Image: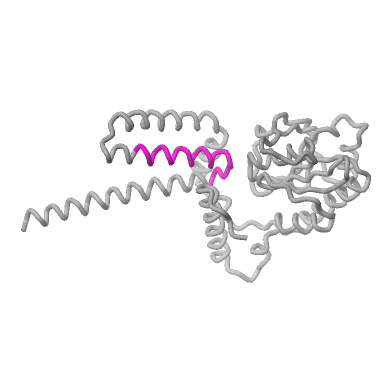
Amino acid sequence: MTLGLGFDSHFTESWLRQSVDLGLVIALTFLVLLAVRDRRTLWMVRGLIVLVIVAEVGQRLQLRLLSFVLDKLVIGAALAMSVAFQSEFRRFLEQLGRGNLLPSLRSTRRVSIDADRSLDRIVDAVKELSQQRTGALMILETNELMDERDFAVPGVKLDAQLSKELIQTIFQNTTLLHDGAVFIRGDRVISAGVILPLSERAASRQLGTRHRAAMGITERTNNCVCIVVSEETGSISLAESGILDRPLTSSKLKELLELRFAPTSERESGQPSLRIWGRKFSTRSIKLMRRLLQLPENK
């Protein structure tokens, strides 16, 4: 009887220890993903998780050679990720050191007169460029600061006040910067002549280089949306997460941008901040897990 109780106690203690160990690893991985939130990193983390799971299964089944090979692959994959995504991990460590690990979950007010005016200026410029059939490509930064190393070529620094006239002038065929993209942060035009990586996904022949560039940068990072004006047809497109929404009218574009930059949940001034925080946490958690596991999103 004493032996049985001792065995049960040892088994329970071992099971609890393993459960806590697994829970802490999952929590740490989840926090890293929330802090980084980069599409490429999610793909690599998903592959690393598969390797770890298979290695653990191999150890449990006592497949020594397979476990040895997979253990080395896991170490190599972790080192490769640390080299390939230095900026993302550096951002995570900086946020951890500042005690600001989850800044994206904090309540921020995106709805402001300045934001509305900026969107109006952008939409007005896009409307006139579309009517003139002048090609244009604009990168609009959304939630967090973008890493400009995601650009193929960072372009020419401007740091100028956003205006309809400035955007229209940049994209005139007679200017030196009209072939590249314009990078917009808030109410400032940060740079122009930005060269973006092209999407490697198969696309319609009707889509030109600007459309593929818009898809490419939004595939690499979730911190921006791209507006494209076709030089051939004057049609307006909006790219987000590697997907093009086209063709759009100027009014539809404004509606989509307002929804993207001014979420409804942040307009509700009567709700307690804790409820807003909880809603944002659950929404981001669900989206993150869907993307990590490649589950289809509800429409």
Please indicate whether residue 253 sits to the left or right of residue 30 in the image: right
> In the image, is 34 to the left or to the right of 164?
left
Q: Nearer the viewer, residue 295 or 108?
A: 295
Inspect the magenta stretch and tell me whether residue 130 lies in it.
Answer: no
Which residue is drawn at the image coordinates 80% and 51% (left, top)? Answer: 247
Say if 125 sits above or below 66 in the image: below
Q: Which residue extends farthest left?
A: 1
Q: Give percent across and percent down for residue 200.
A: 66, 35
Q: Quadrant of residue 78 in the image?
A: top left
Within the magenta stretch, is there residue 37? yes
Q: Magenta residues: mostly which secondary structure?
A: helix
**Within the image, what quadrant is residue 69 found in?**
top left
Location of residue 104 in the rendering, given as x and y in whole percent from the top left corner: 58, 51
User: Residue most toward the front?
Assistant: 205
Which span is picked out in magenta? 34-55
Nearer to me, 113 or 193 = 193
